[in-house]
Image (tube, helix red, strand yellow):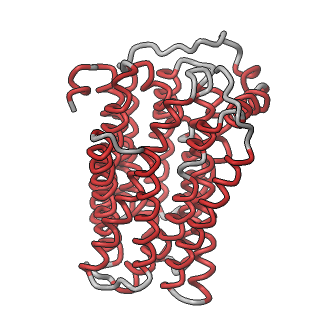
Amino acid sequence: MELVRRSPGFARLWAAAAASQFGDWLSFVALGALALDGGGGPLALVVVLAAHALPGAVVAPLAGALVDRYDRRRVLVAVELTMAGLTAAMALAAATGALATLPLLLLARSGLGAAVPAAETAAVRRLVDPDDLPAANAALAATWSAAYVLGMAAGGAAAMLGPTLALALDAGTFAVAAWLHGGLPPLPVTRAPVPLTTAVAAVPSDTAAAMTTAWRDRPLLAALLGKSPAGLASGAGWIGLNLIAASAQPFGPAALSLGILQAVRGVGTGVGPWLAGRYLAGGGDPGRAQRVALATLLAALAALAVARSPVALIAVALVWGAGTGTNWTLAHAALQRHASDRTIGRLAAMDELLVSAAMVAGAAVAAAVAEQVGVGAAAAAAVGLGGLGLVAARAVVAAAPEMTPAR
C-alpha cells in the first residue's frame, strides 16, 4: 500500500471505492434475502441480479461516452450523490412496506452506477505514474476483495435485523464516497467540451469509434472480452450458491450462510491476484496465469454441484474467488495497458456492459435449469456456460484483423 501513501489523489480514489463497494455488497445480501423471503425462488434471485446489473449494462455506452467528455472528478461526485439519495429512498420504502417501489429505485441507481467504474478506471491513469499502474490495480483489487468480504458478512448480519438497516448504511457509504471524490484534483479530458445534449447525441458514433479501435487491435479486443466468460460462469454459480445457502443453511439462517460464503469468496478474490502477482514478478506469462485462473474458476464451480458440508463449501468459495479475482485483475490491467486515455472511458464501460450482461444471462440459464432439475444442475450449467464463453471470445478475437493501428 506504499502507493496509497505516496499519492494523495489515488488515496482518495481508493478510499472512496472502498466505501462505495462495501455498501454495494452490504445491501446486495439484504435484497437477495428479501427476494427469497417473498417466496420467489430462483427466478426472484435473477430479478435481483438483473436489477443490479442490467441497467448499468444498458446505459454503459452513454456513461462511457460522458466519462470521455467531462471532468472525471465531477462525474464521480454527481453520480455518487445521486445514488446516495436513491438508496436512502430505498431504505424508506423498505421501512414503510412500499416494496413495489424498490425495483424501480434499484433500476435507477444501477443505471447511474455505470459511470463509476468507467470514471475510476480513467482517473487512475491520471493520478499515478505509468510505472505505478500495476500497483494501483493491485491495490484496487485488494480493496474490492476486502469490501466484498466485509460487505457480504455485514450484509448477512444486517439482513437478520431487517433490510432497512442495510440500505440506510449503503446510502451513507455513497455520501462518504462523494465527499472523498470531491477532494480529487481536477481530471479534465483532452476532448473539447460540448453541451450535454451534443454529447448524448454523439454517443452512438463515439461508441462505434471506440469499438472500431478495439476491433482493429487484437490485444485490446482480447482484453475487452477477457472477463465475459468468467461472468457467464459466475452468474450461474451465484444462483447455485444462493440456493444452497437457503436449503442447506451450513452456517445457520440462509442470509447469514450466504453472507459467510460470499465473504469467503471475497477472500479468494484477494488471494488469487496476490499469488498471480508473485508468479508474474518471477517472470511468469500473464496469458498462462489467466488461463490457469479460468480453469480454477470452472473447477470450483464443478465442485459446487456436490459440495454441501461447511468445510467443502468454504473450499469451493475460496477457490472460486481466487480464479475470479485473478482473471479480473489480469484482464483489467491489459485493458488499461492497451487502451488510450481518449477511449478508456468508453471501453471500460463496454467491458462492464459485457460482464454484466454475461452474469445475468448465466444466472437466468442456471435459474431455469435449477427450477427443472435441481440445485446441482445450476453448477453444471455454470461450467458449460463458462466453457462456451471462452470458445466464443477466442473466435471473435481470431476473426479480427491482425493490424494494430496507432491510438
Give the image quarter of residue 6. Answer: top left
Q: Quadrant of the N terminus?
A: top left
- Front residue of 111 and 330: 330
Q: Residue furthest bottom?
A: 373
Give the image quarter of residue 360. Answer: bottom right
Q: Is residue 7 left or right of residue 364?
A: left
Q: On screen, 134 above or below 385?
A: above
Residue 189 rendering spot, x and y as whole percentages: 56, 15
Q: Residue furthest top?
A: 192
Residue 321 rendering spot, x and y as whole percentages: 36, 60
Q: Quadrant of the C terminus?
A: top right
Q: On screen, 296 above or below 348?
A: below
Going 54% across and 61% down the picture, which residue do you hit? 49
Q: Is residue 56 visible?
A: no
- Front residue of 24 and 214: 214
Going 55% across and 45% down the picture, which residue do you hit? 109
Q: Is residue 192 left or right of residue 292?
A: right
Q: Is residue 243 visible?
A: yes
- Front residue of 21 and 253: 21
- Front residue of 245 and 208: 208
Going 61% across and 20% down the picture, which residue do you hit? 342
Residue 386 rendering spot, x and y as whole percentages: 56, 65
